[in-house]
Amino acid sequence: MSWIQTLEYRANAIVGAFAVLSALLIEYLLLSKVFHQQIASNSPIESFASFNHLIIYIMMCMMVGQLKSSWHNSMMMIDEIRSGDLNRYLVKPISYFTYNFMNFIGHNSLFYIVYFIMMFFIPLFIGPGYVFNGLFQIFGFLVTLIMSVFLSYVTYFSMICFSFWFGEVRSLIVAYNVFNIFLSGQLIPISLFPEPLKNFVTNSPFIYMVDFPVSIATSDKNISVDYFMEGLFMQFLWCSIMYLIGKTIYNFGIRKYEAFGA
C-alpha cells in the first residue's frame, strides 16, 4: 500500500527523478575538477585508477545511500509515539517493527525504481568494466544491499525508540543523517579519509551501509571470496547487534509508555 501511495502522485515522481539526476550532475562536476587538479600535480587519487572509476564509485554510493534513507518514516514514527497513535498498533496482532519496515521499503520505492534503471544504463554511458563485472559481483551487491537497507532501518529504529523518554528526538535523527552521509562514504570515498578517521569508520557499522556494497559492485573479477564472506559476516553481526539494541529499547519503552486517545 505504501508503494502504491508513493507512486500515485506522478508529478512528485518526476520531480524526484530530476532531483536525483541533478545531485549526480553536481557531484560529477565537483569531482571532475578535483581529479584533474590532482593529476596535474602528479598526485593521483588513491585507490582509483581513472576518473571514470571514481565517478562510478561516487554515483553508486549516492544511489545506495538514498535507497536506505528514512526521513519520512522516522518522523512519522516519532509523531506516533509522541501523540499516542502507537496505541492502535499495540491492541492489534501486528509487529510495530515489521509494519514500519514495510513502510520504509514502500516510501523508498520511487528511488528503487529510478536508481535500478540508472544502474542498468551506467555501463552504456561510462563504459564497461567499471561496475558489475560478473555474476558474483551482481549477486554479492544485491545481498549486501539488502543487509545494508536492514542495518539502516534498525539503526533508525533504535534512535526513534528514545521518543518514549524524550518525546522529541528529531534533532537526533537529523544529526545522525548528517554524520551518516559523510562517514558512510556518500560524499568522499572512505579510502581517502585520514587514517584515524578511516580506522574508526572501518570498525563501525557505517562502512557496511554504503561502502561495502558499492565496493563489491565496482570490484574487478578477481575479488576475494574471503573478503566478501568476512564483510558479509560483519554486516550480519552489526544487523544483529543493532536489532537487539532497538528491540531492547522498544521493550523498555513500552513498559513506561502512557497514552490516551486513538
Image (cartoon, rainbow, N blue to C red):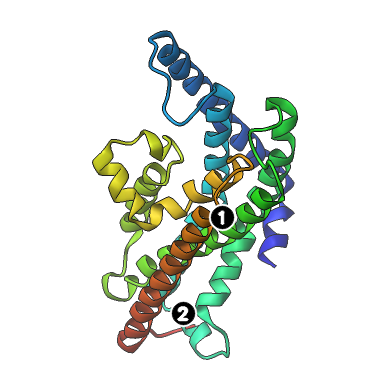
Mark whose residue sits in front, 1 or 2? 1
N-terminal of the pair, mark 1 or mark 2, is: 2
Where's residue 251, x and y in %? Answer: 37, 84
Q: Looking at this rendering, what residue extends furthest in the left direction?
A: 196
Quadrant of the rendered image containing residue 225: bottom right
From the image, tell me which residue sits under label 1. Answer: 225
Where's residue 198, x and y in %? Answer: 31, 43
Q: Which mark is residue 86?
A: 2
Quadrant of the rendered image containing residue 248: bottom left
At 52% from the left edge and 58% from the top edge, which residue is drawn? 148
**For this rendering, which residue is in front, 232 or 20?**
232
Residue 135 in sight here: yes
Q: Secondary structure at mark 2?
A: loop
Tell me: 114 left or right of 79.
right
Relative vertical location of residue 139 with respect to residue 240 in this rendering, above or below: above
| Distance between the alpha carbons at the discs numbered 1 and 2 | 44 Å
At 71% from the left edge and 31% from the top edge, which residue is drawn? 128
**Looking at the picture, which amino acid does disc 1 mark?**
Val
Where's residue 24, x and y in %? Answer: 57, 31
Q: Which mark is residue 24?
A: none
**Looking at the picture, which amino acid does disc 2 mark?**
Leu
Q: Secondary structure at mark 1?
A: helix
Relative vertical location of residue 35 with respect to residue 168 in this rendering, above or below: above
Mark 1 and mark 2 residues within 8 Å of each other at the beta carbon: no
Residue 210 in sight here: no
At 39% from the left edge and 37% from the top edge, which residue is drawn? 191
Where's residue 34, x and y in %? Answer: 43, 18
The local crowd at label 1, few if under 14, some if 14 to 19, many if 20 or more residues have their Cα within 10 Å, is few
**For this rendering, which residue is in front, 96 or 31?**
31
Relative vertical location of residue 244 with respect to residue 260 in this rendering, above or below: above
Tell me: 119 left or right of 34.
right
At 68% from the left edge and 26% from the top edge, which residue is drawn? 126
